[in-house]
Amino acid sequence: MAEYNALPLVKLAEQFARLPGIGMKTAQRLAYYVLTMSEGEAKEFSEAITYAHRAVRKCEICQNFTEPKICPICDNPRRDSSTICVVEGPKDVAAFERTNEYKGKYHVLHGLISPIDGIGPDQLHIRELLARINDSNVDEVIMATNPTVEGEATAMYISRLLKPLGVKVTRLAFGLPIGGTLEYADEVTLYKALENRNEI
């Protein structure tokens, strides 16, 4: 930002720019907008961020974001425990839930294997997935990582670990665009991809 801007405004814009998908121009607009808020609104905004950071945790079973120790999906006895859909992040769970078609459970990795970014299997929640499969009657694991190089590498790595455990490993059908993300796919595309999944 230009030198004539107050330092607190510059620092606020820099914080907004750290968010994914937010460039410096958008960050500056957001920073200026925050300054137009009343003091009460600004306090409420900052408290919402702090509260969410404090109150939201990872589910002890599937690693999805939740407020209680066990998320509502894992805690729901009507969900099919024999099927686990493995996704990159919590946003992908929300995308599948919008279809109202998937009745199984999830496992959230919180990332993908990406050696360039220094992310290996140990940084992901793969150990927890293997423990779940060893401790329960899981028949099928659906690899629902994004159809990117990292998503494919992660799916293949996990499938190699799961095959010796005698569990069926499937991959979403390619109704999803290569290089796209699950978060932005429409419900019909996601449903068709789920319906036409293939074993890997």
Image: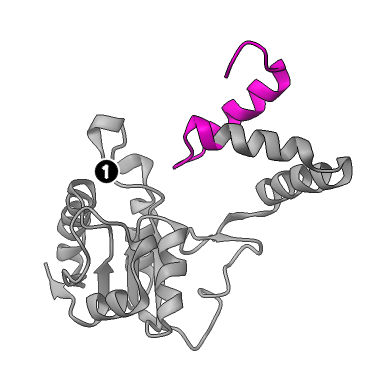
In the displayed orientation, state which residue is furthest to the top.
3
Closer-to-camera residue (22/118): 22
Residue 152 drawn above or below residue 200: above
Residue located 47% across and 34% down the image: 23
In the displayed orientation, state which residue is furthest to the bottom.
78
Residue located 37% across and 74% down the image: 136
* Percent position of residue 88, x then y: 36, 55
Residue 8 drawn above or below residue 185: above
Quarter of the rendering occupied by the C terminus:
bottom left
Q: Is residue 147 magenta?
A: no
Q: Is residue 6 magenta?
A: yes
* Percent position of residue 98, x then y: 45, 77
Quarter of the rendering occupied by the N terminus:
top right
Closer-to-camera residue (14/94): 14
Circle 1 is placed at which residue position?
Answer: 113
Left or right: where does residue 14 sit relative to residue 132?
Answer: right
* Percent position of residue 74, x then y: 51, 73
Quarter of the image for residue 75 reads: bottom right
Q: Is residue 173 visible?
A: yes
Residue 157 drawn above or below residue 177: above
Residue located 38% across and 53% down the image: 109
Q: For the magenta stretch, what is the residue range?
A: 1-26
Left or right: where does residue 103 sit relative to residue 158?
Answer: right
